[in-house]
Amino acid sequence: MITVARYSAREEAFVAKALLEAADIQVFLDDARYADTKTIEIRVPENQAARARELLADREDTIRAVNGDETEDPGVRKESADMLLFLKAGGLWVFGYVLIGLMLRVLGVVLPFHPIILGTIFFLGGLIGLIFGTSRKKRSSR
């Protein structure tokens, strides 16, 4: 058996395994050292290695090269980080609004909790988080 790819996420390894098995390639997932290395190796018989690499190369968004370098487009990683930042910031703003609204109810002030209002707060909070989170990243990288 020869290693044709390494993955840092179990899900990606299982997707690659399913892809290869669908092409009638015998696949072995070697995750014995996952706790130490945080990688799962995909191994196939030597006579099927070229075909397996070719199939996995077609899935560039999930493949990891054998030497551990990611072949993923760096722009995809940045977009994922920005999306996560947007979701976190929007959620925090909604949480803050609800928390303040509950505290004000003690004083007799009632803030509306309509879904449109909460959605607007989420969206604006996400945008503010993106703006300030991205500018903070740029300042810290200088």
Image (tube, grey):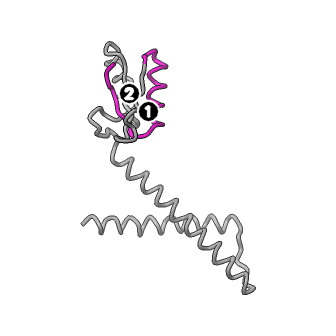
Residue 26: percent from left, percent from top: 43, 17
Residue that label 2 marks: 42
- The amino acid at mark 1 is Ala
77 shown above or below 128: above
Please tell me whether residue 52 belongs to the stretch shown in magenta.
Answer: no
In the rendered image, residue 5 lying in the magenta stretch gets the answer yes
Name, please, the residue furthest toward the top.
Answer: 47
In this picture, is 25 found above or below 10? Answer: above
Horizontally, is 33 left or right of 109 in the view? left
Residue holding disc 1: 13
Going by the numbered disc 2, the residue's amino acid type is: Ile
Q: Which quadrant of the rendered structure holds the N terminus? A: top left
* Image point (34%, 35%), residue name: 64
Q: Residue furthest left?
A: 142
In 3D space, how far apart are the residues under numbered discs 1 and 2 (Cα atoms)? 7 Å
- Secondary structure found at label 2: strand
Res 96 quadrant in image = bottom right
**Helix, strand or loop under label 1:** helix
Q: Quadrant of residue 13?
A: top left
Report the residue at 43% width, 57% height from top: 82
Q: Is residue 46 left or right of residue 87?
A: left
Segment colored magenta: 1-26
